[in-house]
Amino acid sequence: MQRFSPLTNLCFLISIYLSFFEVAVSEEGFCSAPTSVFNGEKSGALYWKVTNPTLSPAHLEDLPGFTRSVYKKDHALITPESHVLSPLPEWKNTLGAYLITPAMGSHFVMYIAKMQDNSRSAPPSGDVERFIFVVNGAVTLTNGSDNSHRLMVDSYAYVPPNFQHSIDSDAPATLVVFERRYSYLGDHVPEVMIGSTDKQQLLETPGEIFQLRKLLPTSMAYDFNIHIMDFQPGEFLNVKEVHYNQHGLLLLEGQGIYRLGDSWYPVQAGDAIWMAPFVPQWYAALGKSRTRYLLYKDVNRNPL
Ligand code: UGY
Ligand code: MN
């Protein structure tokens, strides 16, 4: 015999009771009243949909042509339904979607790499450093000296410029990749870094309540860092930030509101954001579960 959840049973009973008042039960299990009842209209009338949208906000993404993606002078929000995948140049069996590139004004690229069975990376061009973070599946990083490391979800690797390496996968895996032309400074030399988020210690965040981890050393050899920032529901940035640094952000978990300039965007896991220098930025976590985002930030170099 088919069993229903207590919520379904409850809604079913309520719907029978309320059917006298023409109130319906929606598909999600939440009780709701069709607006036509309140308007005293019957479905099927000419122009009925103008005053009775068929799409509730939760279904807005089903509207043909609808996207939350936005591209402006000093910021962009790229949501997953806007990704356009194409073979990554010189990578084997890998599709990519470039989400942030210098065409927007950034000095770095951020892209999603979807590695398929039997796939392999291509090296970045000369003097370009690379950071990879595994979002799904697992990959193997092999460096010049035949050292290999298995990188699972939540693991990452930093590869300095002109450092021979390859990333291989024999099954589907998804990476987020950051690359930029390394900014040399004196005798400082960055080294290969391999790690995972959960092994990184929590750092002090004076004046803020979010939890912060940095995936790269803070020493001068590194011209950017990748922050992992966690917010519990209801927590928000205290500082309404305006700063010279650029950001590339990937929301890994949760939902909330991102303020960018004068615009306020509902965002959720999977969304990517480009923030140009000096764009006012602020975030509040408003979902029912933790927000976690990964954030590129250029550091340790004089902007002049
Ligand atoms: O470090 C930062 O600039 C970071 N707090 N920015 C941000 O989350 N938008
Ligand atoms: Mn910032």
Image (cartoon, rainbow, N blue to C red):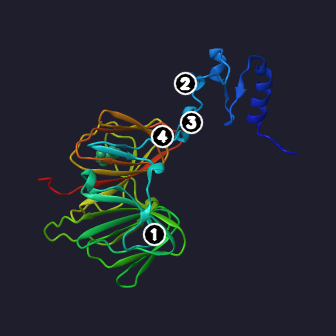
Q: Earlier in the sequence, mark 2 or mark 3?
A: 2
Q: Residue at x 42, y 50 (%)?
A: 293
Q: Amino acid at mark 3?
A: Ala
Residue 145 quadrant: bottom left
Q: Earlier in the sequence, mark 1 or mark 4?
A: 4
Q: Residue at x 76, y 20 (%)?
A: 18
Q: CA distance from mark 4 to mark 2?
A: 17 Å
Q: Amino acid at mark 1?
A: Thr
Give the label, 1 or 4, closer to the camera: 4
Secondary structure of the residue carrying tag 3 is helix
Q: Amino acid at mark 4?
A: Phe
Secondary structure of the residue carrying tag 1 is strand
Q: Earlier in the sequence, mark 3 or mark 4?
A: 3
> Which residue is labeled 2 in the image?
50
Give the label, 1 or 2, closer to the camera: 2
> Which residue is labeled 3 in the image?
58
Give the label, 2 or 3, closer to the camera: 2
Q: Earlier in the sequence, mark 1 or mark 2?
A: 2
Give the label, 4 or 2, closer to the camera: 2
> Which residue is labeled 1 in the image?
94
